Amino acid sequence: MSLEELGKLVEDGETEEAQELAEKLLKDGTDPLKMIAEMTRTMARVGDLFAKLEIFLPEIMLAGEALSGVVEVMAPYLEAVGGRVVKGKIVIGVVKGDLHEIGKNIVKLILETNGFEVKDLGYNVDSLTFIKEAEAMGADFIGASSLMTTTIPRQKEIIELLKAKGIREQYKVVIGGAPTSQMWADQIGADLYCKDAKSAPELMSNLLNS
Amino acid sequence: MTTAYRHWEILERSQTGPFMDEDDFLPKHFTPTLKKLIKKYEIKYDPKNPCPTDDDMADRIWQAAWELFRDVGYYNTDSHRLIQVTDEEIREALYMAKDQYWVGGGKDAVLWKHRQIEDTAPPFCIMSPDITCDEQYHQSICMAYLKEPLLDGICGPILEKTFGHLIESSGPTEISGCIQHITNQKLAARLLGRPGTFMVAVGTAEHDSGQIAVSNDEWGVQKTDARLVGSLTEFKTADTLLNRSLHYAQYGCYTGNLTGAIYGGWCGGSEGTAVTTVAYSLIGLVIHGAIFNQHFPFHLNYGSNTTRELLWAISMAGQALARNSKLLHTSNGFANAGPMTEMLFRETAVHAMVSTVTGWHLWEMASTRNKYKNRATPLEARIGVEVGHAVARQGLSRAEVNDIAKRLLAKYEDDAADAPIGSEYHECYDVAKAVPTQEHYDMFRRIKDEIAEMGIEFPF
């Protein structure tokens, strides 16, 4: 029974077994911060495998579920040592008129497994809804995804609405999706463009700490 | 006449079928069913052979695809219900499907027929940049594609702006952009003396309202043309999509079903991508009444389908469809590299030869991962359809194509992740005359000669 075994169970997406082992390890006195560190290493490994498509989306989703299960078990133990460090809060969704959400779902998972608190707004999300949800959450970021050239103007619309409401500086706007680019991000005044899911956590952390 | 299959019964099921939470549909229903079927039918990817010769596996993939559709159903994200069909209904729809259609009008009409594996009849060739372009180049690009001699049908570039306004899906700019799109395309066909050319239009429409706005036999999309209806990944639809297939059927034009199973996504690997692609053809027929299926399975990371994992899936899906149905299906190439690069010509050639020999018709070519504006030209499509014609007329076997494909793959496969994005249309075409620059044409000719030396006998 070790943290490495727990990591393997999470990697294999075995939620129930991982939860049972986590509970046992914690009761036996394992440092929850060490467990968090092991989970971070595990998900980095899983993320790398997925980036190279040595595993596929269903496998990383299962690993993500198992991780959530373990985090749930760890919650009271983490509270006792000061709580889990949240790297940032984000509302994320696919813009209005766009029904393609696979990319957004991958980004959501990668962010969650890297210590971000994520509120998923789904797809076909009105621009004002992004803002209202960000306000309600006290988010640091608004993440807007788009797969179609005819829906990327909605990313710009979010920024324009933030300006119109006089709260542009309160949120970092992150954009992504197949037709988007750094050039488009610059053009609409987005704070960050992520070309893929894997790069998002580090780029967002850097932006928040800059 | 189309193969439209009981539209109202299907639509009713999208309101009354079994409820399922959307969050559960893919992870708990679609993927586990697919995995079970891949195991049951012993479907196995072979990275050594991008174009295998395996009739038995093709038939097993067909059977797995049939059961996938029957057992999973098709999920409507608006009603949260599953549209389910029976074996009898699939059999009836396949029996009623025709194996050939006249498309296009007048002297430009073309008979589009089902193809077999290693068929000596050339593929039906639709050319499309599949990409957005600046408004100022739209007319020229339409002209340039319509100048291609082997073009049987066109799907024009997508407008980003209309009269200077950024097009927004479901808004007035989309309606305007769609009308501008079809007007440019029809005018280009008339100016070039092929006014009845078959068109698949309009790609500028993301929302159903944009498609409906261009249904007009005098100036818009005619009844001799086709329109596409897509799916949401994977096996999901929505009312805005069902609106389309109903409108196309009631308007009276042809319907094509547009799907791209994602390698690395919910389908998993090559095996799941092949099975899902075949199942989409059944969905197109039964759910949407499509006369053809337009498939572009693609790599989750690259957004392309010219590497061997995808070529294998395309090849096996084509063989499964050709051997077990009389349906029409186009193979839509997605390349990593951009225009006026040797890599793009090689990628397109490989995609076209593997598709042609396994029974597909051709839809060439989305360049530069279908991501960058203005980065697609007719010249890469030309090499694809010339290869397709050559492979068919020459009567090449799957094994022979497999060998040539491997030699070409060796020249570009390692560069897939960092492929060059090449040039924009106006940098490698004379915009006013809509013809390639000499430098661009010389590169095309050089790679064509290279492919000819590998054993492809071009007719001209």
Image (cartoon, coloured by chain):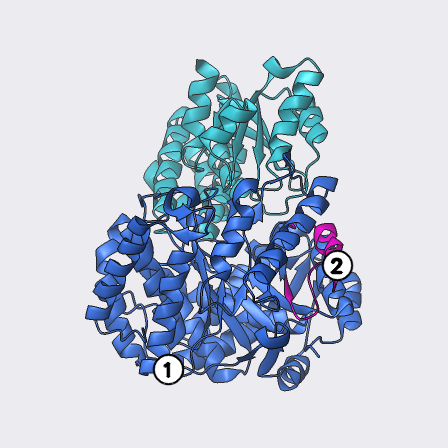
Chain colours: A cyan, B blue
Residue B267 makes an appearance in the image: yes
Most frequent secondary structure within the magenta stretch:
loop
- Write the residue at 34% across / 67% down: B45
* Circle 2 crowding by C-alpha within 10 Å: few under 14, some 14–19, many from 20: some
Which range is magenta?
B205-227
Element on which disc 1 rests? loop
Residue A12 makes an appearance in the image: no
Q: Does the magenta segment cover residue B213?
A: yes
Q: A40 and B23: which one is in front?
A: B23
Q: Does the magenta segment cover residue A149?
A: no
Q: Return the mark for residue B118.
A: 1
Pointer 2 chain:
B
Q: Earlier in the sequence, mark 1 or mark 2?
A: 1
Question: Residue B339: x, y in percent?
Answer: 37, 49
Q: Name the residue under label 2.
A: B243
Furthest toward the bottom, the residue is B95
- Write the residue at 74% across / 70% down: B252
Question: Residue B340: x, y in percent?
Answer: 33, 49
Quadrant in the picture for residue B460: bottom left
Furthest toward the left, the residue is B453
Question: Residue B110: x, y in percent?
Answer: 56, 77
Pointer 1 chain:
B
